[in-house]
Amino acid sequence: MNTRHVHAAQGLGLAAFVSSLEYLARSGAVGRITLVPPSEMGTTLVNLLVSGEITGDIWQTFSVVLGAFSLAVLVGIPAGWALWQSAELKEILDPFIITYYAIPVFVFYPLLLVVFGFNRLPILLIAFAMGVVAVVINTANGFEAVDQVYLDVGRAVRLSRYQRFRHIALPAALPYVFTGLKLGFIYSLIGVIASEFILAGSGLGYLVSNYYTTFNTAKMYAVMLFVVIVSVAINQTLLRIEGRLYQHRVNA
Amino acid sequence: MATIELEDVSKTYDANKRDSGVEAVRNVSMHVGSGEFVSIVGPTGCGKSTLMEIVAGLTDPTAGEVTIAGEPVTGPRRDVGVVFQKDSTFPWRTVLENVEFGLQMHGVTFDERRERSRDVIELVGLSGFEDTYPNELSGGMRQRVAIARTLVMNPAVMLMDEPFGALDEQTRIMLGDELLSIAAKTEQTTLFITHSINEAIHLSDRVVVMSARPGQIKETVGVDIPRPRSTDVFGSERFNDLSERVWELLKPEAESGLQR
């Protein structure tokens, strides 16, 4: 199949899904408490955005995501580099890193709430905890995968340690590091919204949960739609950058 | 006068978790004259790559000393260029950016490094590919880029570790031929490592035959075929005699290498 056919099939599938939801809701087959027509989700979302009703929550959610993600990068890249530099450190930490994603970090959320109080900090820490290890692992893997011959070229032309890092190891590892950033961002976003959903007083996750418990189905779906649109847009952007980083790799 | 002098060079790799220590090279002494082209042939694992790393200053010998242009080698040198067997072109840089890499790192101005890089790119026959990325080039062309990246630094000594080892036979012969004309122009001293007997004879003034591990020099064979040479030397009577002579020396070593 060529790309145009694939895109056409994907668009058709999505359109069929949305229209069937529209039909189910409009025909009354599914009650309004459960489902509103997608067209109404859209108009409700536009109204929410225009009225400014959810602006504070959008800002709240994305500032925490950005904070958690930045922290994950600031800690994760140096940590990944350290793991590459020190075989001992890697040997010691390996079992912990491998086990890490088997632990649902959300179970610590109540504990963090008790320790840090009912504010943004526990959410930020959960999101950081979810994002940071993806950055660490991918950074370490990226450096690990740097071909020794590249580093030998650097030594042969008498580069300093810093030059070898900056001009050889880093560009060679960059696609992997970026994959770590991409995953780290997405995990941070999931961490923030899920935490807000569980227990918070503001933010997009809180809105979904709040509209749900108050039977405000149209607004609940509108916020969900917003989260989906923004996440997909961010992910597409990151994928595009990633593709550009990989495009000249021999084995890509 | 960039001569290379090896005096009783030995190298034993330290024991680690996997190995009980390996004696790679034992008591190697040799001399490469200024502008001379010398090849080292030997069975797989005879330590010829180790020997080159030592001459390049990338690895320290356990015993003995290497002298280049009269100075003991303590690390990588400005006047020594190295070409590796593995594809070492940087995929994130274009051909031109690859070639100018060393100059750029050493602070040569943009205009000067571009001009010098273009000259060398022409010399290795890659004109027109300046803005191409390595993944769009064949293995042979990528190896030319690696050679150009080394040549641009104007080394008095070229160390080449099976630079054409990963290429097919025809490409290998053609690149060897080009290397001959480049070496004639630059008048540099070349130490060339290969496992191809024909390649060694085609290119060299002398062929050093090494024994199986621990690598020692078994014998040196002088190649008295007049220069300039071309691919026409293949199949000539003198070429076949020399080839046979080197093979006679190498055969028992290759056999003992197989029995390990």
Image (spheres, coloured by chain):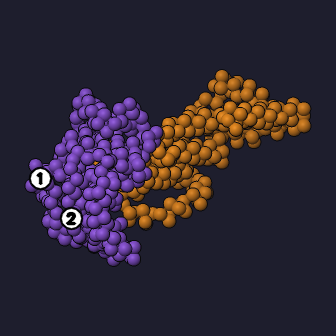
Chain colours: A orange, B purple
Chain of residue at mark 2: B
Depth check, front residue: A156 or A90: A156
Depth check, front residue: A142 or A214: A142
Q: CA distance from mark 1 to mark 2?
A: 22 Å
Q: Which residue is mark 1?
A: B69
Q: Label 2: how many residues lie within 10 Å, few (<14), some (14-19) or many (20+)?
A: some
In the shown orientation, is residue A55 left or right of residue A163? Answer: right
Residue A224 figure quarter: top right
In the shown orientation, is residue A71 left or right of residue A86? Answer: right
Seen at 39% across and 77% down, the residue is: B259
Measuring from the top left, give residue A178's x and y in whole percent.
48, 43
Residue A25 figure quarter: top right
Which comes sooner in the sequence, label 1 or label 2? 1
| Residue B40 visible in image | no
Measuring from the top left, give residue B160's x and y in whole percent.
28, 53
In the shown orientation, is residue A36 left or right of residue B211? Answer: right
- Mark 1 or 2: the one toward you: 2
Seen at 36% across and 45% down, the residue is: B174
Measuring from the top left, give residue A181's x and y in whole percent.
50, 44
Seen at 16% across and 69% down, the residue is: B8
Relative height, residue A118 to residue B117 (above, below): below
Which mark, residue A49?
Answer: none
The furthest residue to the top: A50
Q: From the image, which quarter does the N terminus of chain A lie in? A: top right
Question: Number of labelled discs?
Answer: 2
Residue A16 figure quarter: top right
Query: What is the three-letter code of the residue carrying label 1?
Result: Ala
Query: What is the three-letter code of the residue carrying label 2?
Result: Thr
Relative height, residue A39 to residue B243 (above, below): above
Q: Which residue is mark 2?
A: B220
